[in-house]
Image: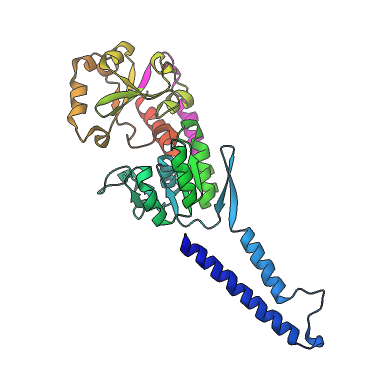
Amino acid sequence: MLRIQYKKWSLYIFCITIISVMAGCATSESPSNKPSSTQPTETEISGSDAKQEKQTDTRTIRYLGNSYTVPNNLSRILLLNAFESLEDAVLLGYEPYAASAIGDDEDPFPGFFGTVTANTIPLLSESEDSLEYVLDLAPDLILSTDMETAKVLEQLNKIAPTIPTSHLGPDWRDNLELLAELIGEQEKAQQLISDYEQSKARVKEQLPALQDKDIMAIRMRGGEMMVYPKHLFLNDVLYGEAGLPVTELINKIDQQTVISLEGLFAADPDYLFLQFDLYENNNDEKLLSDLLENPIWKGLKAAKNEHVFVNAVDPLLMGGGTAYGRMSILKAIEEKLR
């Protein structure tokens, strides 16, 4: 920060010196060589250009009802726990400068991200522990998350302009359009949205026969089964977009909730999407096999009718909160729910 301020003052002093020299030259000229009062001097032209350039150094971005002032030249966008934006970046083919890792040192980003994150600097620690490192990276802009604490967001804004992006499924379109506007890929984003809407219409045509069926999505984390509200993860597409009936169990919860085998058996869904990732389950693959072999699990209607779909949607996806996730869920619905 001190280096940046020093450079600004040096430039200011340099400009004053140049203007003074030019002014001195102008007064030493004969009256016949003086420019007409109707024509701007070279100094005035330079000053006008500098003012115009200063005015265009930043731009205003509108996002979810708020305005954010960001630099025009964004060569170093850092994504801190903005995992939805990270997936949007992959879909738009944009390589972030730095981003919070999803994996570990060896594999910080999922394989399905392809080469997009090949040169992205991975951030492996929690937000508050990353602040000093983020400061050293000197980003032009930080995309964070609305799940971050006010204290951390305040500290981030001291480093660079910070936009807390939404983690809610219904805001997926705004998230995609935000990043697209920042990187100049608005046309590509609109094409992706159009493609998604066409896929959704096609999938909905095949689902009327399932309106009397119970369809649920479960995610294993730390060896426990989790269910989510109707607007999070896979549910926002299953119920909100595809129009499948919301099960009674899901209607009763408003946050991530642990469900026991006995509780799942009581709900007894007809179709079941199960997500299991080793990283979220202490790298213990036996947790999944033990669940699938449990007699109570085997007694579920979905299990008996072979309507259990394990990782039909990659568990590392952010689910219905991103365009990438929504497209993946629609594909899984189209392939599995027939």
Picture coordinates of residue 311, whole percent (x, y): 30, 31
- Say which of 245 and 207 sits in front: 245
Does 202 lie within the magenta span? yes
Picture layout, residue 55 above or below residue 254: below
> In this rendering, would 172 be left or right of 58?
left
- Give the residue displayed 81% in from the left and 78% down from the top: 36
Q: Which residue of the protein is positioned furthest toward the top in this rendering?
A: 266
Asked which colour scheme the image uses, the reply is rainbow
Does 280 lie within the magenta span? no
Picture coordinates of residue 275, whole percent (x, y): 30, 29
Q: Locate the C terminus and report the quarter of the image it occupies.
A: top left
- Give the residue displayed 70% in from the left and 79% down from the top: 23
> In this rendering, would 277 be left or right of 320?
left
> In this rendering, would 270 be left or right of 203?
left
- Give the residue displayed 45% in from the left and 40% down from the top: 151
Q: Main secondary structure of the magenta part?
A: helix
Which quadrant would residue 249 be assigned to in this image?
top left
Picture layout, residue 331 above or below residue 143: above
Picture coordinates of residue 156, whole percent (x, y): 46, 47
Which quadrant would residue 287 be assigned to in this image?
top left
Which quadrant would residue 149 be assigned to in this image?
top left
Which portion, as a residue range, is magenta?
Answer: 194-216
- Say which of 11 and 222 sits in front: 11
Picture layout, residue 220 above or below residue 92: above
Residue 306 in sight = yes
Residue 185 in sight = no
Picture coordinates of residue 264, whole percent (x, y): 30, 16
Picture layout, residue 57 above or below residue 315: below
